[in-house]
Image (cartoon, rainbow, N blue to C red):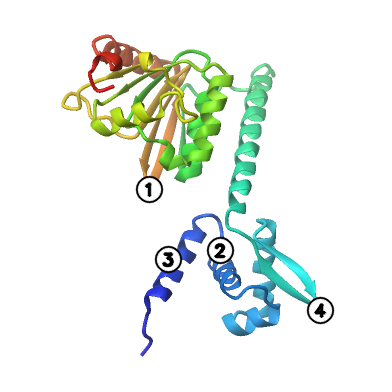
Amino acid sequence: MIVVTKQMTELIRLKKRLEKFGLSPKQAEIYVYLIQSGNSRISEIVRNLKIPRSSVYENLKGLKQQGLVEELIENNYRTIQAYSIGLLKDHLDEQMTKLETQIGELNNLEKVMEVIPGIKPSPPVRIRYYEGKSGAQQLFWNSLKAKDTLYVYSEWGRGRFVGIKFYKNFVTESYRRNIKEHVLTNPLPRIAQSMKEHTGSPLSRTDLTNIRFIDEAKIRFRGETLIYDNIYAQIYLKHNLISGFEIESPDFTQTQRAIFEGLWEPAGPVLLSGLI
């Protein structure tokens, strides 16, 4: 009978979490082994993990591409060394930059195609779906293209779901692009406390005069809703389930903007709430 120890359980969980960052099950297994054992020869990995040599080579290739391992030559033989998992942050940042560049290129391509004779016009409504943390990051980053005032329904605390480093960059870029926004949220103690702690910090991008409270008995805000230009976006934020969508439609967005403005006027200013 195999006895499953606490350490074994933790290792299984660690491998599963690594898989969420793009590692295959075999890559996660090899990476964890290298962290535990230190520099190892390929023959040692094959023997101890009982993985075919060809599979070890293939999975190490993937780990090298992500910058998580490196091949070293020691005493006339080759060993594999594991690097910090923190290097994945740089990899994700590169992906975000690449995605932003591609989106910009696609926007330009759309404009070019619109003037080409014979090209059929785009449908009046487009819906785009996004999954996971990176999807939520992209939805927020897309809102930096806003040409008019960005309207937001907020549950507050988005930074802990999309990553503090990303959110600081997002706030910095918001200021650089001079993004203006109005935010409606609920007068909950945790939200008021967060405003007190972060106002004026690198995590704060909205002046308190542009935030208003609506009692949760009337509307309980969940996740984040972003309304700007011709875009209506919603983001559901929970650690085990992050997803969202964008609806690109002038008519639909105009209606949603009118609803927001109708709620904004009677809403209570944050600075007069007595909570801040």
Q: Secondary structure at mark 2?
A: loop
Looking at the image, residue 267 lies above or below residue 2: above
Which residue is identified by label 4? 75
Instruction: Give the mark nearer the N terminus: 2 vs 4.
Output: 2
Q: Secondary structure at mark 1?
A: loop
Q: Residue at x 61, y 42 (%)?
A: 93
Seen from this angle, which residue lies furthest left? 217
Residue 24, which numbered label? 2
Foreground: disc 2 or disc 1: 1
Seen from this angle, which residue lies furthest right? 76
Query: In the rendered view, does 262 fall on the left or right side of 23?
Result: left
Which residue is identified by label 1? 239
Q: How many marks?
A: 4
Q: Residue at x 53, y 14 (%)?
A: 147
Give me the C-alpha separation between circle 4 and circle 1. Answer: 46 Å
Foreground: disc 3 or disc 4: 4
Type of amino acid under label 1: His
Give how far across and how far down residue 91 sits, in percent: 63, 48
